[in-house]
Image (tube, helix red, strand yellow):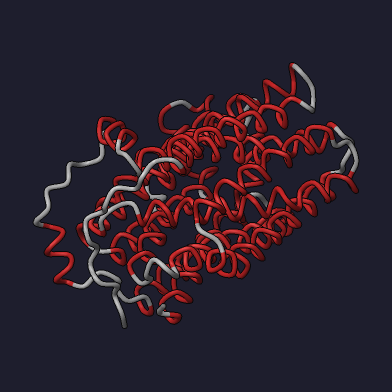
Amino acid sequence: MNNKRLFSIFLVVFVDLLGFSLILPLLPYYAEQYGATPFVTGLLVASYAAASLIGSPILGRLSDRYGRRPILLLSVFGTLLGFLLLGFAAPLGEALARWLAPSAAKTFVLGVLFLARILDGLTAGNITVAQAYISDVTDEKNRARGLGLIGAAFGLGFIIGPALGGLLSKAGYSVPAFVAAGVATFNLMMIALFLPESLSLARQEEIAQIQRPPFTLSALLVALRRPVVGPLLHLRFFYGLAFSLFQSIFSLYAQAIGLTSDRTGYVLAYVGLLVVIVQGGLIGVLTKRFRENSLIISGLWVMGFSFVGWALTRNLGTLLIVLLPLAVSGGVLNTVIQSALTKSVARDELGGTLGLAGALESVTRVIAPTIGGFLLGTLGVWAPGVFCALILLWSVWFTYRRIILVKKPVVPPAAEVVNG
């Protein structure tokens, strides 16, 4: 395994997620300044995920054809522009209002905020392409460990970013956006100067000869029907739906059981730290000792019981205990399912397939907050946990029936791992 390249891509993902998490928790407050209702704020948050549903698979497919490095540069550049639009939303919106409709200044500012998030979402292929990059420079034995670094970078970014964003917001909600733009600029320079391409020119030319259709809904449906890839994509969706529901509704749950905002932040940092430990180190030990299918089925069982515990928990001490197996199983599942996906397709399909997985994850981030909010508001704080547990119970049955008990077909031989 090429440790130098893995460290480089780890830094790229960490810096990217640091910038993203700087502004994410502040978006509702930023939008509220300009008259956004809770519904409009929800649409603003969901607009990023909806746009990335389109952008991720397209960028993943393009990275198969043109290489990982240029698509990473394109993606991070889009992120930079999105953050700049976010920071300049007020002056841009007010300028447009003076020109078109002076009485609707707040509406135009909100429009710029939406444009910023949609642009960032459309170019949000960073993680997908980074996963494909790691798949290029690792063999199957070390794949899960390499992909675990993505999760570790993710967790570190989300531990540091929200706290830093909160401090910067005291100077104004646009300040974290400008700092995030600076972080994206630094990331762009790191990729341009220090990250080599993972696909050789010969391999890119070989892939170019293979006629892959552009991403369409029918391409997704075809992938979902494939013998090995399809069940893994289904599993990625349902596991992702449960975990996204937990993430999106947790603040409301914490508020309902009486936790203050600062304690809620500490709890989320605790979860992030656990995920970093699992995906940054523990996952390599586990994948060497156990088969991936065993880790998937065990992770589903553990997470399902953890969600039941979450549904029944009403105090901070018990919550910290319940979140330990939940975070550990989430870190394992996220890495191992992605690793299994990369091993189920030929090398020329890696980016496209991971892009489809990213698109399905984006769907979960669009619908999970709505489902979770409805369950919590209508039935009570126990309902989201029970719903998530039922999803995991069904996923266990699905995994046994469609993955564990099915003989894996032979995948076309992959190209040699890129060394350097």
Quadrant in the picture for the N terminus:
bottom left
Q: Can residue 180 be seen in this view?
A: no
Quadrant in the picture for the C terminus:
bottom left
| Left or right: residue 252 compared with residue 300 | right
Q: In this view, does 61 lie above or below 281?
A: above
Tell me where residue 168 appears, x and y as whole percent.
Answer: 69, 59
Which is nearer the eye, 36 or 372?
A: 372
Q: Is residue 193 above or below residue 406?
A: below
Can you tell which quarter of the image residue 44 is in? top right
| Left or right: residue 384 compared with residue 214 | right
Residue at x 34% of width, y 73% of height: 192
Can you tell which quarter of the image residue 163 is in? bottom right
Which is nearer the eye, 133 or 343?
A: 343
Number of residue marks: 0
Which is nearer the eye, 5 or 336?
A: 336
Tell me where residue 196 appears, x and y as whole percent.
Answer: 32, 76
Q: Residue furthest top?
A: 378
Which is nearer the eye, 412 or 117?
A: 412
Tell me where residue 83 appears, x and y as whole percent.
Answer: 49, 53
Residue at x 12% of width, y 64% of height: 205
Q: Can residue 71 be seen in this view?
A: yes
Residue at x 59% of width, y 55% of height: 332
Tell me where residue 267 appears, x and y as whole percent.
Answer: 79, 51
| Left or right: residue 162 compared with residue 410 | right
Can you tell which quarter of the image residue 130 is in? bottom left
